[in-house]
Image (cartoon, helix red, strand yellow):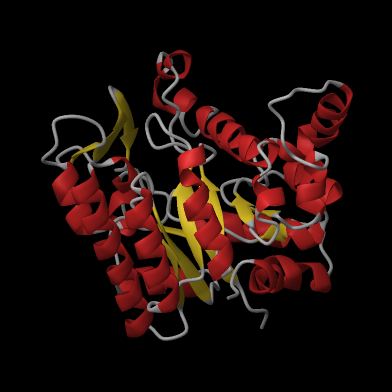
C-alpha cells in the first residue's frame, strides 16, 4: 500500500475555544451556535458537517475519532496544524495558548505512535517569545515545520520585525506554512465571511503576504528557507509568467529579490499543497507551472470532506511514481526534515 501523509490536518485546542467564548471582540467564539467571529461582524459557521461530526467537534478532537477518520480514508499520517486565532491575542494569552496547543499535539503524537506529526503554532507577533517557542517545538518536541497565517489582524510576516524569526526558522531547518486568514481590508469585509475568507479573501491575502516575502528578498537573505502555500499555490500557477514578465520589464526600487519570482518555486524555496482545491484544471496548471516535485498532499481536514479529497486525488491522471511523490516523497524531501 502507498504511504499517504496529510500535511494539512487542522485542529483547535478546546481550552482555547473556551477562552475565545469569554472575549468581547474578535476573535470570539459563540459555542451555542458554533460560530467563530473571525473579524468584527464577520462570522465563520463551524457547525456544518463535512465529514462525520460538526466541523468544530472534529477540530477539537484529539482522540480515537480523528484516527478513525484517517483509517476510513487511508491516511497513514496526519500533520497537525492549528487553525487561526491565537496569533491575534494579547501577548500573555498568545504565548500561553501556543504552548498549550503545541503540548497537546505532542501528546497525541505520543498517544498514537506513527500516526501524527506536529507543526508549531507560535505567538508570532511577539517575536522574542515566538523564537523561544519555535526552538522548543523543533528541538524538544520534534515538530517538523511552523504553521502561520497570512495576517495577524494588522501585521504581516513580510514586515521587518519578523526577520529574526525567519532567520531562526532557517537556522533550525524549519519550513513555514503561510495559511490564509480572513482579510481585514474594508472592501473585503463588506461582502461577508465567504467573500472575505474562503471564497476569495483567503487566496488574495495569502498571495499578498507570500509575494511580498519573495519581492523583499527574504529567500535571497535566507536561501535555505522554505515556504509552503496551500490550495495548489493560491493564484501563482495561473499568473506566474505574467508576474515574471512585469517585474522584469518594469523596475521598482522597492523590489529587492535577485531573481524572477518563478526562480523561488523552481529552487524549492516555495512548495505547494493540494489543500482545499479539488479542481483537475487547477492541479494540471500547477503541475505544468511548477512540476510534480513541488506538489504535496494536504486535505484541509475537517474544513474539506476527507473522502471527497481522496476521491479527487485518485481521479487524477498520475503515474504511480507521481502519486508517490505527491502523497509522501515530496513532503519527506522538502518539509518533514531537520
Q: Quadrant of residue 210?
A: top right
> Where does residue 270 sit, x and y in percent of width and height?
69, 52
> Where does residue 22 sit, x and y in percent of width and height?
10, 40
Rendered view: 158 above or below 336: above
> Where does residue 129 sit, x and y in percent of width and height?
32, 56
Rendered view: 169 above or below 86: below
Along the line of sight, which residue is nearer the eye, 160 or 306? 160
Along the line of sight, which residue is nearer the eye, 204 or 192? 204
- The N terminus is located in which quarter? bottom right
> Where does residue 291 sit, x and y in percent of width and height?
83, 55
- The C terminus is located in which quarter? bottom right
Point 45% across, 20% down: residue: 185
Point 81% across, 23% down: residue: 251
Along the line of sight, which residue is nearer the eye, 64 or 204? 204
Point 61% across, 66% down: residue: 335
Left or right of 272 on screen, residue 118:
left
Most extreme residue toward the left is 22
Left or right of 221 on screen, residue 27:
left
Q: Is residue 122 visible?
A: no
Q: How many marks?
A: 0
Point 64% across, 58% down: residue: 226
Left or right of 8 on screen, residue 254:
right
Amino acid at each position: 500500500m502507498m504511504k499517504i501523509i496529510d500535511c494539512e490536518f487542522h485542529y483547535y485546542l478546546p481550552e482555547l475555544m473556551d477562552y475565545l467564548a469569554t472575549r468581547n471582540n474578535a476573535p470570539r467564539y459563540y459555542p451555542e451556535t458554533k460560530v467563530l467571529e473571525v473579524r468584527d461582524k464577520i462570522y465563520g459557521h463551524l457547525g456544518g458537517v463535512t465529514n462525520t461530526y460538526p466541523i468544530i467537534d472534529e477540530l477539537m478532537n484529539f482522540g480515537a475519532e480523528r484516527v478513525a477518520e484517517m483509517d476510513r480514508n487511508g491516511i497513514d499520517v496526519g500533520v497537525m496544524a492549528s487553525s487561526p486565532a491565537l496569533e491575534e491575542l494579547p501577548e500573555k494569552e498568545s504565548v500561553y495558548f501556543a504552548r498549550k496547543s503545541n503540548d497537546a499535539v505532542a501528546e497525541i503524537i505520543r498517544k498514537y505512535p506513527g500516526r501524527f506529526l506536529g507543526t508549531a503554532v507560535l505567538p508570532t507577533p511577539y517575536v522574542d517569545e515566538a523564537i523561544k517557542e519555535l526552538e522548543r517545538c523543533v528541538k524538544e518536541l520534534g515538530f517538523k515545520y511552523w504553521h502561520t497565517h497570512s495576517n495577524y489582524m494588522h501585521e504581516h510576516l513580510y514586515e521587518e520585525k519578523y526577520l529574526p524569526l525567519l532567520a531562526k526558522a532557517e537556522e533550525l531547518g524549519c519550513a513555514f506554512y503561510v495559511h490564509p486568514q480572513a482579510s481585514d481590508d474594508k472592501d473585503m469585509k463588506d461582502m461577508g465571511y465567504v467573500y472575505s475568507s474562503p471564497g476569495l479573501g483567503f487566496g488574495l491575502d495569502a498571495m499578498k503576504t507570500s509575494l511580498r516575502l519573495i519581492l523583499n528578498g527574504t529567500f535571497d537573505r535566507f536561501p535555505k528557507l522554505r515556504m509552503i502555500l496551500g490550495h495548489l499555490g493560491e493564484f501563482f500557477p495561473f499568473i506566474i509568467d505574467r508576474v515574471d514578465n512585469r517585474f522584469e520589464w518594469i523596475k521598482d526600487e522597492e523590489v529587492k529579490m535577485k531573481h524572477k519570482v518563478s526562480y523561488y518555486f523552481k529552487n524549492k524555496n516555495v512548495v505547494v499543497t493540494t489543500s482545499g482545491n479539488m479542481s483537475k484544471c487547477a492541479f494540471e496548471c500547477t503541475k505544468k507551472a511548477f512540476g510534480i516535485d513541488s506538489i504535496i498532499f494536504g486535505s484541509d481536514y475537517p474544513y474539506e470532506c476527507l473522502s471527497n479529497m481522496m476521491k479527487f486525488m485518485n481521479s487524477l491522471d498520475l503515474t504511480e511514481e507521481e502519486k508517490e511523490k505527491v502523497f509522501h516523497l515530496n513532503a519527506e524531501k522538502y518539509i518533514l526534515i531537520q
